[in-house]
Image (spheres, grey):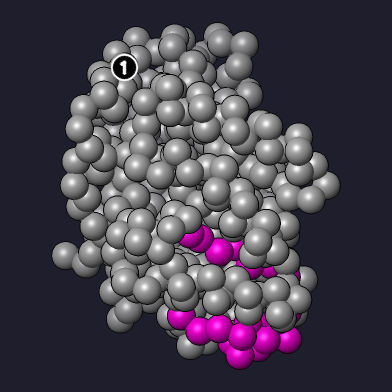
Amino acid sequence: MPPDETRIEPPLALLAELTHRCPLRCPYCSNPLKLERASDELTEAEWRRVLGEAAALGVLQVHFSGGEPMARRDLASLIGEAAGRGLYSNLITSGTLGGERELRAFAEAGLKHVQLSFQDVTAADNDRIAGLAGAHARKSAFAQAVRAVGLPLTLNIVVHRQNLGGVDQMIEMALSLGARRLEIAHVQYYAWALTNRAAFLPTRAQLDTATRTVEAARERLKGVLAIDYVVPDYHGVRPKSCMNGWGRRFLNISPAGKVLPCHAAETLPGLSFPSVRDAGLADIWYRSEAFNRFRGTDWMAEPCRNCERRTIDWGGCRCQAFLLTGDAARADPVCALSPDHGVVEAALREAERPVEAFVYRQYG
């Protein structure tokens, strides 16, 4: 039965993954295990067309990401295209390529915001996790350049069992670098992070201590620094509303042009994700089988089908359900009501074991 397009709202945000090229090798990277080569990337002309289609579709925000989006020499041009289409543009960057000269060009083109990642507060630990010597120093200089240009700055720090004890220092670093917002995001276990789960999953005691630190800082720094805090799914009792529901508010375009409901969706077997090289963005959003497969609640089985939270968490994450159970249509196992919740409990026991070495992100 074809979807009722009048019941499907347009997307609000587009994550434009311009490239998988990146100088960092973060072992929790959300990029797929099979990275796309530069030769397969959408051209500037193709991205310009996509941005126009996104604006016409109703998208309000575009997040330029990667890999490292500053590896694209046409980034300023694409920012200008987005601005010309009335799109609010955000740069998600590692801050290890370029500096004030590039940032001024981006600001002049219409960039509105910069989101800069750090891996830890000390240079040694940051660079060890990032897999790049000197990365922390480059990031710190980049943060200063963002403020010199006058762009608002958000710091993003991914936390896990190996750096969670430094949350208070992370907050102080954000203040010292002039950030308006700090996102402290626990590792979510897909792609490279799932491969390295045993090295990253924190204990409950670590999580509780960090959470108390964040809550106290939020109160103390109200009006000074906004702190977003993303907790690890595995320690919850109910799943998160992944991407605000499959195909409801968000779409992701890979470097080679595949259109996805989330960055991990390609892990799901049996779904063919269309490319912007073969179809228009509106047609993909409203009519593709992949986007309609898990929209709404009709696809749900028990315990989700009659759960009072079914239109709040939308059954949780489809990718996580598949990765942990082998079936994308099952309840997200992080939910305590899921019959598969035992696989999460088993994973949590890993957090009590000695830390394992990383498998770093890399081509091949």
Q: Is residue 52 left or right of residue 287?
A: right
- Tell me the residue at 51%/27% (across/down): 209
Kindly indicate the quadrant of the structure image that contains residue 268: top left
> Who is closer to the viewer here, 298 or 360?
360
Question: Is residue 226 shown in magenta?
Answer: no
The picture places residue 9, in percent across and down from the top left corner, at 69, 44
Element class at badge 1? helix
What residue appears at the point 56 percent right and 83 percent down from the top-left corner?
99
Q: Residues within 10 Å of mark 1 (few under 14, many from 20)?
A: some
**Residue matched to label 1:** 345
Identify which residue is drawn at 43% across, 22% down.
205
Q: Quadrant of the C terminus?
A: bottom left
Apparent side of residue 356 relative to residue 104 in the rendered image (left or right): left
Closest to the observer, 47 or 195: 195
Residue 43 x, y percent position in the rendering: 45, 82
Placement of 294 over or under 177, stated as above or below:
above
Q: Quadrant of residue 353?
A: top left
Expressed as whole percent of the image width and height from the top left, the position of residue 240 reads 54, 29
Q: In the rendered view, would you say 95 is above or below 169?
A: below
Indicate the amino acid at tag 1. Glu
Residue at x 48%, y 88% (from the top left corner):
73
Q: Nearer the viewer, residue 294 or 266?
A: 266
Image vertical order of residue 277 relative to residue 239, above or below:
below
**Range covered by the magenta-colored residues:** 97-118
